[in-house]
Amino acid sequence: MRELVASTDIPLVLHGGSDTPLEQIQAAIKIGIQKINIATDIRTAFIAGLKQGIAENPDAIDPRVFLRSAKQRMKEEAIRKIEAFGTRNRI
């Protein structure tokens, strides 16, 4: 990966970041990987939050009630990743 990053001036993307150990992701960032795809982690957090919202509000008929927990879980997961990747305040 180091050779690939060194051989191009195009920003490189790590696909499958959700299944990649954090140490490997951090190493990839250090050598120049510019984007990490973590959609599965975000979707997993969404589903966990949705299940939580439904369990906590079994009689609710407004999906916005369930989606609050899902949105919060996604946000928490995104913040965890941003911090783990060392990218807070870099945009």
Image (cartoon, rainbow, N blue to C red):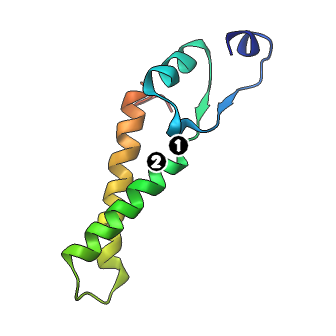
Q: Nearer the viewer, residue 79 or 40?
A: 40
Q: Circle 2 sits on which residue?
A: 41
Q: Residue at x 27, y 71 (%)?
A: 53
Q: Residue at x 19, y 74 (%)?
A: 56
Q: Badge 2: how crowded within 10 Å, few (<14), some, or many (20+)?
A: some
Percent position of residue 88, x then y: 40, 30
Please identify the quarter of the rendering in which residue 68 is found: bottom left
Percent position of residue 9, x then y: 77, 18
Q: Relative to 19, is 46 above or below?
A: below
Q: Residue at x 29, y 65 (%)?
A: 69
Q: Badge 1: how crowded within 10 Å, few (<14), some, or many (20+)?
A: some
Please identify the quarter of the rendering in which residue 14 is found: top right
Question: Amino acid under label 1?
Answer: Ile
Q: Relative to 12, is 5 above or below?
A: above
Question: Amino acid under label 2?
Answer: Asp
Percent position of residue 52, x then y: 26, 67
Q: Circle 1 sits on which residue?
A: 38
Q: Which mark is residue 11?
A: none
Circle 2 SS class:
helix
Q: Nearer the viewer, residue 69 or 16?
A: 16
Q: Residue at x 62, y 27 (%)?
A: 34
The residue furthest left is 56
For the N terminus, the image quarter is: top right
The reply to whether dot 1 and dot 2 touch (C-beta < 8 Å) is yes
Q: Is residue 53 left or right of residue 14?
A: left
Gap between marks 1 and 2, in whole Å? 6 Å
Q: Relative to 79, is 35 above or below?
A: above
Numbered-mark total: 2
Please identify the quarter of the rendering in which residue 49 is found: bottom left
Circle 1 SS class:
loop
Q: Relative to 26, is 66 above or below?
A: below
